[in-house]
Image (cartoon, helix red, strand yellow):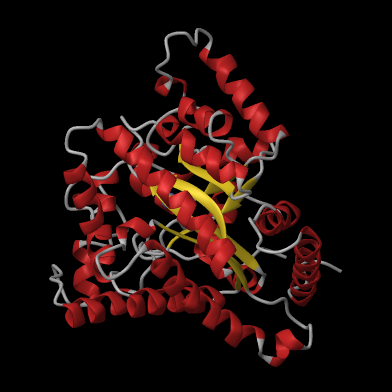
Amino acid sequence: MKITKEFIKKIPKTDLHLHLDGSIRISTLIELAKENGISLPSYTEEGLKKLVFKDKYENLGEYLKGFAYTSAVLQDKSSLERVAYELAIDNLSEGVRYIEVRFAPQLHQNKDLNIIDVFIAVNQGLAKAKQEFNSTDKVKSGAEPPFGYGIISCAMRMFDYGFSEYFDKLLDVHKHSERKWIFSLASQELVKASIEARDQYNIPVVGFDLAGMEKGYPAVDHKLAYSLAHKNFLKKTVHAGEDYGPESIFQAITELHADRIGHGVHLYNPKLIKNKEIKDKQAYIRNLAEYIGDRRITLEICLTSNMQTNPDLVELKNHPFKKMSESKLSVTFCTDNRTVSSTTVTDEIFKAVQTFNINRKDLKDIVIYGFKRSFFYGTYLKKRKYVRSVINYYDKIERQFKLKD
Ligand SMILES: [Zn+2]
């Protein structure tokens, strides 16, 4: 039988690359903007979809525009908690059972809100959704796997005036120092706060990430922050190879100890290799891809988002996912931004199945890999048990849909 959208909606899924601020419901954005006196280019869903949250974008710059509005409304505890709660509910309603929500706490920091407050607020929203779902009979009886989540804290590769109140102040204080040094210090401060949130407040901060513009802002500037995260057993992912070449991915793995890579869309692109010392570009890419495959470094694939920020790909069939999956690299489908990319996990998987002819067995491997390569909060034994329960449930759905005997 064919893999249908209904089937994909039913199977237990993950989203390991999911930005809080890029996934706010448009209706909530409008409500919060009105409450907080923040001006939007339109106050209707249709209007915002036409002007800001489009299906197609000209480039990464246009894609990023929407974030100015979403982060502007996420500057207080109740808004952060509400948006986090709704995000979990939206995921649950399409069968997503495990999410890792990422955001840059420093972009929500202001005189009334410190980094820990931001973590607490987001965690409250997610925990509420988890508690509600996991106390339903279907979960309590063991008929269905529970919902789980982790938090990934994002450092920024760069920030500019107007990014946030907090950063503006920091830039003023350090007016005369080299800017990249400020960005590096901000990242280190974030790691410390992430560890504090995890260890002192029992908030499931499981990972550390680096986001923001790649070009001109190499990940290696944040080496000290990553080293601190590494030494404190925070797992690591890095946005790499989204807007920059294979070297960015290489740096993320070798210098920042990345366990996973966000996007990696230019993994196979020799044209983006700039280092003159790399004479044989094809060999460099081959070795890099081999290493990623062999070490099971997972690529967080966001098909819709990649098409929107890299219009040069033209058609989805040109996306390097095809090559990645043929080479048996570890991949997982993610949305990146549910609102900014106008997508869902179900849509992402359905698109992939249709475009790349993924068969039943390969789809199951990829979906289960999301659970396996998650930065699960809890013991390894608990994680194994959870993954087992997910596999059993997946098998059950396959039987229901007669995809399996
Ligand atoms: Zn992202």
Q: Position of residue 214 (x, y in %)?
A: 36, 36
User: 104 or 50, which is in the foreground?
Assistant: 104
Split into 4 quadrants, where in the image is the C terminus?
bottom right
Q: Position of residue 182 (x, y in %)?
A: 30, 39
Residue 17 visible in the snapshot: no
Check the image and name the residue furthest to the bottom: 137
Q: Which residue is rendered at x = 17% and y = 53% of the image?
A: 162
User: 204 or 266, which is in the foreground?
Assistant: 204
Q: Which residue is rendered at x = 37% and y = 73% of the image?
A: 80
Check the image and name the residue furthest to the right: 405
Q: Which residue is rendered at x = 51% and y = 75% of the image?
A: 126
Q: Is residue 84 left or right of residue 55?
A: right
Tell me the quarter of the picture where residue 34 sits.
bottom left
Q: Is residue 181 above or below residue 132?
A: above
Q: Is residue 41 above or below residue 400?
A: above
Split into 4 quadrants, where in the image is the N terminus?
bottom right
Q: Position of residue 365 (x, y in %)?
A: 73, 53
Q: Is residue 83 left or right of residue 362?
A: left
- Numbered disc total: 0
Q: Which residue is rendered at x = 56% and y = 66% of the image?
A: 200
User: 138 or 72, which is in the foreground?
Assistant: 72
Q: Is residue 11 left or right of residue 187?
A: right
Tell me the quarter of the picture where residue 136 sits.
bottom right
Residue 104 visible in the snapshot: yes
User: 343 or 187, which is in the foreground?
Assistant: 187
Q: Position of residue 300 (x, y in %)?
A: 55, 48
